[in-house]
Image (tube, rainbow, N blue to C red):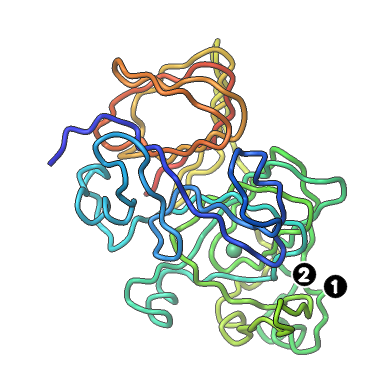
Amino acid sequence: MTENTEALFLQSELHEKIWGGDHLKEFGYQLPSDKIGEYWAISGHRKGVSIVKNGEFAGQSIAELWQNHRELFDNQPGAVFPLLTKILDANDWLSVQVHPDDEYARLHEGPNELGKTECWYIISAEPGAEIVYGHNAKTRKELAAMIEAGEWDKLLRKVPVKAGEFYYVPSGTMHAIGAGIMILETQQSSDTTYRVYDFNRRDADGKLRELHIQQSIDTLTIPGDKLPLNQTTTETFDGAKLTTLIKSDFFDVYKWEISKSHDFVKIAPYMLVSVLDGAGSLNINHKTYALKKGDHFILPAQIEGWKLSGNLMIIASNPK
Ligand code: ZN
């Protein structure tokens, strides 16, 4: 057992992608190439786990803490740390894809595999940038026929995006992130992706990436244009503006804009916090941590309250 009342600041992995770029250096990360697509900022996933940088758990991974110090996470059940926070830098279209729900993932991918519901906070978007969000097929038969015929312009529902927007992407949603977009993604900790269409691109070895047509037809929601309405609520205080972006079955996500300071009381068993802009500080009891753009940390279960000061734009989340 531990009486940890420290925030857990994290060091995480960069992932190269064919659609990546070099914009993640704006967050202070040292990029090993100019094809970096993703920073897995808060992750217990085996394909890229975050390591604690400070305090008594320095050097340990989130996966290890989930196994050996579950009290930090309020002794919540589950085989794996349930959420994954990423920052993505899309310089080209990502593949058009769909993720299964928990039941389909368990049956088809393995007993410890989760489905994947995700959501996107748009950090920046170049003029004209678009995402694929949903599809236009009305029946599964029509969906299969349009995929078979390659009628992508007819099938894919393209939506223009702007910085500051938020999109909830439940499992079963056809989706893709377009060129010129940076997002912060909060998702279930899963890497199970069924690729529907990859723009006929070839990788560095001249190969087409694998497609998963049957799994996609099985798991895509029908009809594909009934997407959740964005219902955000905002509370304004003297030194802060707090917005609830989504409350879902898997996670709640918040945007905290601090202009002076704000005292928070615990609202969930534990929280994942990402500083997307500005600088300031975090106070817990009598301890002060400096904060800057690109920092990511977990507020474990032992922390009952905290104060944020300065000029900060933060995306925070908690699991369900
Ligand atoms: Zn996805």
Determine which quarter of the picture holds residue 5: top left
User: Residue 72 placed where, x, y %?
Assistant: 25, 42
Which residue position holds label 2? 156
Q: Is residue 255 above or below residue 16?
A: above
Determine which quarter of the picture holds residue 212: bottom right
Residue at 57% from the left image edge and 69% from the top image edge:
172
Residue placed most toward the observer, 93 or 212: 93
**Residue type of the residue flagged with mark 1:** Asp
Q: Contact, CB < 8 Å: mark 1 with mark 2? A: yes
Residue at 69% from the left image edge and 38% from the top image edge:
164
Image side of residue 246 versus residue 150, left or right: left
Which residue position holds label 1? 153
User: Residue 198 placed where, x, y %?
Assistant: 73, 76
Where ligand 1 lies, by image quadrant?
bottom right
Residue placed most toward the observer, 304 or 245: 304
**Residue type of the residue flagged with mark 2:** Leu
